[in-house]
Amino acid sequence: MEATTYIKRTHDGRITIKSGNKVERVMSGTLTVLTALTIMAFIFFDYTGLDLGEAFPATVYNLKTMFLEPTLSHFSWGEAFYQVGITLGLAFLATILGAVIAFFLALMAATNLSKEWVSKTIRIVVAFIRAVPTVLWVLIFAIAAGLGSEAAVLGMLFHSIAYLVKAFSESFEEVDQGILEALRATGANWWHIVTHAVLPSTFTYLLSWTFLRFEINFAVAVAMGAAAGAGGIGFELFMASGFYFDLREVGFITYMILVLAIVLEIMSTRLKNRYFPDSSAN
Amino acid sequence: MSLLTVEELGKTYNSGTKVLKNVSFKVEAGEFVSIIGPSGAGKSTLLRCINRMVEIDEGKVHFDHFDVGNLNKKDLRLLRTNIGMIFQHYNLVPRLSVIENVLHGRLGYKTTLQGVLGKFTELEKERAFFLLKKLGIEEHAYKRCDQLSGGQQQRVGIARSLIQEPKIILCDEPIASLDPNASKVIMDHLKSITLELNITCIVNLHQVEIARSYSDRIIGLKKGEVVFDGPSHRLTTDNIDIIYGTENRETRELITV
Ligand SMILES: Nc1ncnc2c1ncn2[C@@H]1O[C@H](COP(=O)(O)OP(=O)(O)OP(=O)(O)O)[C@@H](O)[C@H]1O
Ligand SMILES: [Mg+2]
């Protein structure tokens, strides 16, 4: 009698270790289609007037002026720092306000701390807000508040709240059900449980998520400076490239943003390592 | 009047099967009662009906002067401050210190604001240290709970329930995750609580021998029904066979050893 075999083989007889399920087939199908589309797009581009022999050196030259000879010509160092400060301020404001509001909404959205219908409603609303990109929210708020920093902060705030509610509420749901039960059994009320069990257990996660969102918001704030006239370094970048065609200044501003992004990254890593040395372990 | 009276208690979860059927018994102040029975018999559910961590469907539970099934939110909190609870997995907040976890037992007596701000009186803090000392873990007071061994964590759990100044302590398999030595320490502490402080203990146990040697009285539960209720020395092997549905010697030894 032949024993049933669970080993799957390819047609040339070698053992396969992919389970070959539907998800994998869909994935590889999608990738194939995307590759084909990309190649086709390049073939059907309109190449008239393009002289590769000329375009290539010109691009290299432009990049060279941009990144090897950065200078400031339309404003001073002091002004540059001030503008960076504005961008940081926008990001900071949106993140901090967002985190505080998101904290309370997330408590209501966490299934272990809230009624089912409340948590479901908040989840759906928040998912909807998250589905619309930040830029669009800024433009929507610009209808009411006019283009500028108010609309930018409101739009960023809106999206930050939605993002953080999801992140926070999922952290809350990770809290051991037994701990909540134990505190409830002592007669502690809901606020006691939140402050004495949920918050201490999730604090490091909340901070990490907020840092992460701050980094995102900084990048968004740069873009909003240009797109929504929110001011700050993004606006100067927009002026330098689109208005003055000053490649050297564009290069300078790009470096500033890069340095700042690195500084932020280092700061958040340092803070995490210093105050929560255990957060990487569990 | 007895401290605790359970009358014809019935409980059904959403799934539909009756987890508790017609359970009745009385417990006096200062008694040490063990509840034994196979997995799924409803032991945990029975304990949770006493402090109404689960809703009571049928029958009545009277504790002290409370009618447990009919309490508003405020009285329910008051009831729970009178009832300590100890768990198999200790259920401490792992990132907080031992002393903070012990003081959680006082939250039931606090207003929302006092509790949120963590305002504990000096008297309460001294009491917490006194209890830790009695339980032999005073030197760990400022350690984070996740740095303690299982036996030490369970003692923190006991301290947390004792600081409530309860009239009764419910223990849901307090030693199921502990080795024999740590188990003995915990059971000795529970026993001395009833003897010295006259606090009633109801303990869910899986070890029949331990139930027999520590408790005044044993309640045997099977499929949600009380099939034995009497002084522990009256628990015979026949009773054990009925409770656990065991028929041969080998499986009985597995349970009783
Ligand atoms: N929250 C719940 N929702 C639905 N059913 C539940 C719930 N809790 C327990 N049950 C069911 O109730 C029955 C009794 O469970 P219970 O936990 O009281 O048993 P137990 O005697 O404590 O068992 P063990 O010794 O394994 O802890 C089981 O069949 C279980 O599936
Ligand atoms: Mg149980």
Image (cartoon, rainbow, N blue to C red):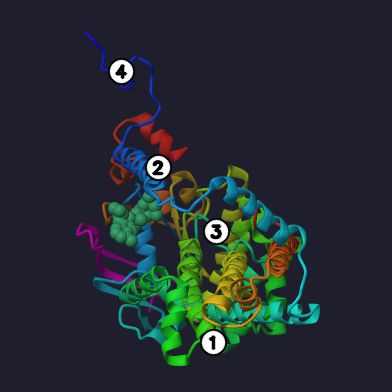
- Dominant SS of magenta comes to strand
Quarter containing ligand 1?
Answer: bottom left
Secondary structure under tag 2 reads helix
Do marks 4 and 2 share a chain? yes
Q: Chain of mark 4?
A: A
Q: Note whether B42 is above or below A17 in the view shown.
A: below
Amino acid beneath label 3 = Tyr
Q: Residues within 10 Å of mark 3 (few under 14, many from 20)?
A: many
Sooner in the amino-acid sequence: mark 1 or mark 4: 4
Q: What residue is disc 3 on?
A: B90
* Ligand 1 is within 8 Å of the C-beta of the residue at disc 1: no
Q: What residue is disc 2 on?
A: A39
The CA distance from mark 3 to mark 2 is 61 Å
Range shown magenta:
B1-28
The CA distance from mark 3 to mark 1 is 54 Å
- Can residue B111 be spotted in the picture? no
Do marks 3 and 2 share a chain? no
Secondary structure under tag 4 reads loop
Q: Residue furthest left?
A: B16
The CA distance from mark 1 to mark 4 is 63 Å
